[in-house]
Each structure stands twice: as structure tokens, then as C-alpha cells.
Image (cartoon, rainbow, N blue to C red):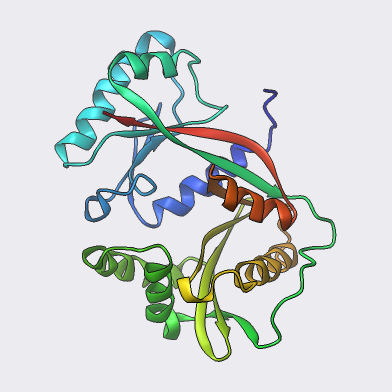
Amino acid sequence: MAVDGRWQLFEENENSWFSLWSEAKDLGCALLLINEALDDDPLPNHATRINCDAEAVAELLDRVVLEYQTKGIRPCLFISPLTYPKNLRATLQDIGFREWNQLCVMEFAGADGVKAPEPSNLVIQRIGSDLLDLWVQIFAESFMVIPPQIKEYSARARHLPLHGEVELFLASLGGEPAGCAALYSKNGVGGVYSVGTLPEFRRRGVATAVLKVIVQRSKALGNSSTILQVFSEVGPVSLYQHNGFELRYSKSIYLLR
């Protein structure tokens, strides 16, 4: 696979976004994202941006495993087309890691935005700090966040308004809160994150309408690319393809057995 020069910016967007929800530890040849309060979730707990000499792989992996296991977190690595050295996958398998899932990195490629119709009683708004608790509630219910972790998400979310790159969105259908999303803009890339819909409002056009608003907003902010990342299940990938996003590359999530 030929590597696009923009992919580094895509990865930086994601790493910066998850750094808002985790503690970031830079090892020089790898970036560790750590949040002990969310210890069962690989998104805020993984090693990424791995780039080292082949001879240093074993030492690096020993350090990564130790960092996470010391905190009671299952070691996890994200392997992208930018990861180096290329023998890393084989080394991971040799020491007991397995490929758990893949993340599809998709970029909006529709020139005129998402064109799908939306319900007439749907309202999507950018929110301020006054509605942060509601945003977290919708996010938690959409993604089945367990109660002990909601407190951590709420605490982290309170700092989001301090970051000018972050914009949060709430969708309401018929006056009832129905969905949420976030746009994180950095270095000309708009990253779409946390696109969630409450179970009772799914398959009613909420997510599509949210994407339409966010794509338009990302363009208005001057971003040259609008991206998102989604697990490789067919349904979600198809949804985003239907709404103008195209697959750019995939990355593997490796977990220690």
C-alpha cells in the first residue's frame, strides 16, 4: 500500500484527540495513551506512533507491556501503515499478542456534502459548557459506557471547552435528545469522533444528519480533510460510505492474550 503524505496528519489528529481523554507518555519511539479509570477500553489505552529500529523492537515491547501491566491495563498497540519496523506484527504474535480488530480510517470525498434527507423535526446544535453533562449522558447511553466510567468521562469533558479545536454537537428529534458527536480540528484536518445515537432513535436519519452538519462545519473552519475512524464491521463502514466517506487505510489493534 502506497503511503499518502497526509496520513501522518490524520494520525496526529487521532492521537491528539485521545490525549484529551488519557495521559500521554512519549517514549520517543512510541506514544503511550493511558487512562486507568477506563482500563477496559483500548481507545484511551494503547501504544501508537511506533517507529524504531528492528533491533530495538523487543526492548520497546517489553517496556510497553510493563507500562500497561503495572497499571492493571491489558497491553494494546495500534499498527498503521506508518508503523516501523515492518516486522513488528510478527514479533507481536511471537510474544503472545493477537489481532483483535481493525480501525478503518475514512476521509470525506463528497464535493457537495452529505445529501441525504433528514427528519423535519431534527435539530442539531453546537453546544457550550452548559450542556456538557447532557452530551456525556447521550454519549454514555449511545456507547453503553458502564456507570463507574461515566464519572471519568464527565471530568474529562469539563476541560474540552478549554481546547479551541474541539466542538461538541447534540442532536434532538422531536424535542428529545437523540445523538451526539464531536469535531476536533488540528493542522487542517477535521476529525469526527463520538458519533452516537440513542438506541430508540436509531435508523431514523440522526447520524446521517449529524455528519452533514459536521462536514459543513469542518469545511467552514478551513479544514482541507474531514476524517473519521470506525471499527471494521460492515454496517458502520457502509453507513459512512453511503454518506460520502472513502476508506484511506486500515490499522490493526493488537491485544496481549
Q: Nearer the viewer, residue 88 or 173?
A: 173
- 54 vs 222: above or below: above
Q: x, y percentage for residue 36?
A: 22, 50
Q: Could you tell me if residue 163 is visible in this image?
A: yes
* Placement of the N terminus among the 4 image quadrants: top right
Q: Residue furthest right?
A: 112
Q: Nearer the viewer, residue 41 or 206?
A: 206
**Horizontal placement of 225 versus 165: left or right?**
right
Residue located at (24% from left, 37% from top): 74
Residue located at (24% from left, 68% from top): 147
Q: Could you tell me if residue 188 is visible in this image?
A: no
Q: Quadrant of residue 208?
A: bottom right
Residue located at (28% from left, 16% from top): 95
**Horizontal placement of 57 versus 64: left or right?**
right
- 133 vs 41: above or below: below
Q: x, y percentage for residue 12?
A: 54, 43
Q: x, y percentage for residue 232?
A: 54, 42
Q: x, y percentage for residue 157?
A: 38, 69
Q: Residue furthest bottom?
A: 175
Residue located at (26% from left, 28% from top): 257
Tag count in the figure? 0
- 93 vs 213: above or below: above
**Horizontal placement of 244 versus 227: left or right?**
right
